[in-house]
Amino acid sequence: MTDISFYHLEHLPVEKALPALLDKVISSCKKAVVRMQSQELLTLLDQSLWTAGHTKFIPHTAKKDADTEHTPIFLTVTEENPISADVLIVLEGSSIFEDFSRVLVMFNGQNAAELAEARARWKTLKDAGHALTYWQQESNGGWKKAA
């Protein structure tokens, strides 16, 4: 069964918190698809990953026709996996499909709709027998395992 973790954003927005998780994916020699619902967020993340001044470069693409064979991170608003990624990162309540060994569900704890959707998704996945973990964002932007 797919390993699913929930990441509750409380102190840093997704464009600041996501690079550290992507760095861990790359460091573990894995690839990730980052799926969201809005083109606006995709554009923001694409720009952020190029310009945010991270300690490490986060190679990525949002173009299906790019050199996806050598790109470990793919940003998308659709259900596609052109890089044969092992990890799916879900934003904005996007859909999950189980062709991934690991799924990270990131949600904004300051947004009531996202919080309610994450709670409902947790219950549905738990009832389906998935092993779930819950990570709460600390004030420094790090993560603390809470469940």
Image: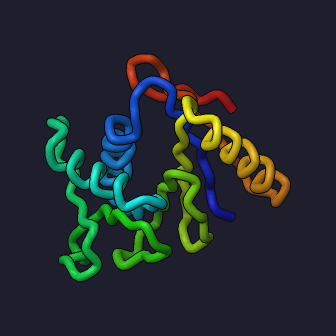
In the rendered image, the vertical position of residue 9 relative to residue 21, given as above or below? above
Q: Position of residue 9 (x, y in %)?
A: 50, 33
Q: Position of residue 6 (x, y in %)?
A: 60, 43
In the rendered image, the vertical position of residue 139 relative to residue 18, given as above or below? above
Identity of the residue drawn at 18% across and 42% down = 56
Identity of the residue drawn at 25% across and 73% down = 63
Identity of the residue drawn at 35% across and 49% down = 22
Left or right: where 122 falls relative to 99? right
How many marks the image carries: the answer is 0
Q: Position of residue 36 (x, y in %)?
A: 46, 59
Nearest the camera: 146 or 97? Answer: 97
In the rendered image, the vertical position of residue 35 relative to residue 64, given as above or below? above
Left or right: where 4 falls relative to 106? right
Nearest the camera: 22 or 1? Answer: 22
Image colouring = rainbow
Give the residue furthest to the right.
127
Q: Quadrant of the C terminus?
A: top right
Image quadrant assignment for residue 85: bottom left
Nearest the camera: 121 or 29? Answer: 121
Q: Quadrant of the N terminus?
A: bottom right
Left or right: where 37 falls relative to 118? left
Nearest the camera: 36 or 105? Answer: 36
Identity of the residue drawn at 54% across and 26% down = 144
Q: Position of residue 98 (x, y in %)?
A: 62, 70
Give the residue furthest to the bottom.
65
